[in-house]
Every structure is written in C-alpha cells, then in structure tokens.
Amino acid sequence: MKGMTVMDLARYIRNIPDFPKPGIQFKDITPLLKEKEAYRYTIDALAGLFRKNKVGVLVGIEARGYIVGAPVAYILGCGFVPVRKQGKLPAETISSTYELEYGFATLDIHVDAINEGEKVVIIDDLLATGGTTAAVIELVEKLGGEIEGIGYVVELEFLHGRKKIPSYPVHSLIKF
Ligand code: AMP
C-alpha cells in the first residue's frame, strides 16, 4: 500500500481506558477500519502471511475477527468459518468455554465446518491473554483441522498470550 507501513498502523489504534471494565485498556481498531489505506494495508499484510499455505478455510472469531478475517479469506481464495458466541449458530455445534481478560465466555463452531485434515488459519483482531484463541484451537483440533497459523492485527505482548498457544506460528502486525 502506497506509503503505509506496519509502524504507521499503530497510529490508528485508539486507547479507551477502563472499557469494558475498570482497569482494562481497550484497544479500539475502528479508527484503523475507517481509514481506507490502513484497513487495506492490514488485510493485505495478514493475507500475505498465509499466501503460500494452501489454506482450506479461515476461521474468524465473532465479531471483530469477521471484519478482519472475511476479507483475508477472500484474498486467499479459501472458505470462511465463523466461530460464534454461545447459542448463535443454527446447526449442530461443539463448544469450548474459556477465561477472557475480562470474564468468561463460550464459543461454538458448526460440527461440519472443517473437514478432517483441512488446512486452517485462525484470525482475530487482538491477542490478549490467549484464552480465546486457545478455545478456538481446541474446537478446530476436535474437528480434525490442521492449523497452519494464527494472525492478529494487535498483540498485547505484556499479557504473554503466546504462552497459551505454543504449538502454532503466531503473527501480529502491531505489538504493544
Ligand atoms: P484473550 O482471550 O484474552 O486473548 O482476548 C482476546 C479477545 O478479547 C479478542 O477477541 C479481543 O477482541 C478481545 N480483547 C481482549 N482484550 C482486549 C483489549 N484490551 N482491547 C480490545 N479487545 C480486547
């Protein structure tokens, strides 16, 4: 993208103190999404990481993971699989419950979303403690998917989320 670099992307992440709870500094990516060059650069950069992986499906995590993951899947020419919060997917699902930086949550995936041995990439907007990603990994592995790698726009390195997901290549564009 013309003139844009990974360094510049950090300028478009807005800090919201004490959201959604006191003590949490929320990294708001909406200024990045709104800026056409920054959004395009972000999507192209993430897609570039997995271009050679012959990805079968990209798994995106509700909801900001869709905004980032779906256009990456489009560029990679692979399918898109939504992981959703509990009770939203209409067909038969499997679930995984996990601890978040701010609470607990359960995530669902359709049982027929991934074929045995299919190559999978996981995309979310942000890596914090790694709990969400660990839960998604559990779902993908249960369905027999082979995880090629995991990509994020933002990584909060001080939370050491990578320690929860040691088995796979992890990429992030912006580190705080
Ligand atoms: P974690 O499971 O702790 O890695 O949290 C990652 C998930 O929670 C991602 O889907 C993020 O969108 C969201 N999240 C956690 N912490 C933050 C934060 N400080 N700012 C923005 N999003 C966050």
Image (cartoon, grey):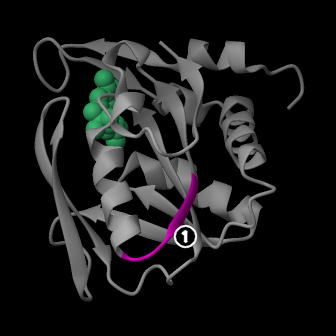
SS class of the residue under badge 1? Answer: strand
View quadrant of ligand 1: top left
Q: Answer with left or right where residue 156 lies relative to residue 7.
A: left
Q: Is residue 117 magenta?
A: no
Q: In the displayed structure, would residue 123 be above or below residue 21?
A: below
Q: In the displayed structure, would residue 63 be above or below residue 145?
A: above
| Residue at 55% across, 48% down | 68
Image location of residue 122, percent across then percent down: 50, 54
* In the image, farthest residue toward the right: 2
Q: Judge by depth and name the residue closer to the eye, 56 or 89.
A: 56
Residue stretch in magenta: 143-148
Query: Can you tell me whether the CB of the residue at mark 1 lies under 8 Å from the nearest atom of ligand 1?
Result: no
Image location of residue 15, percent across then percent down: 37, 13
Using a 10 Å C-alpha cutoff, classify the residue at mark 1 as few (fewer than 14 neighbours), some (14 to 19) or many (20 or more). many
Q: In the displayed structure, would residue 152 be above or below residue 120?
A: above
Q: Answer with left or right where residue 101 lies relative to residue 154.
A: left
Q: Answer with the quarter of the image where residue 37 lies.
A: top right
Q: Judge by depth and name the residue closer to the eye, 37 or 59.
A: 59
Q: Is residue 146 magenta?
A: yes
| Residue at 74% across, 59% down | 53
| Residue at 47% across, 45% down | 167
Q: Answer with the quarter of the image where residue 22 lies.
A: top left
Image location of residue 121, percent across then percent down: 57, 57
| Residue at 50% across, 84% down | 115
Name the image quarter holding the N terminus.
Answer: top right
Image location of residue 132, percent across then percent down: 29, 45
According to the picture, the residue beneath numbered tag 1 turns out to be: 80
User: What amino acid does circle 1 point to?
Assistant: Phe
Query: What is the number of callouts on the image?
Result: 1
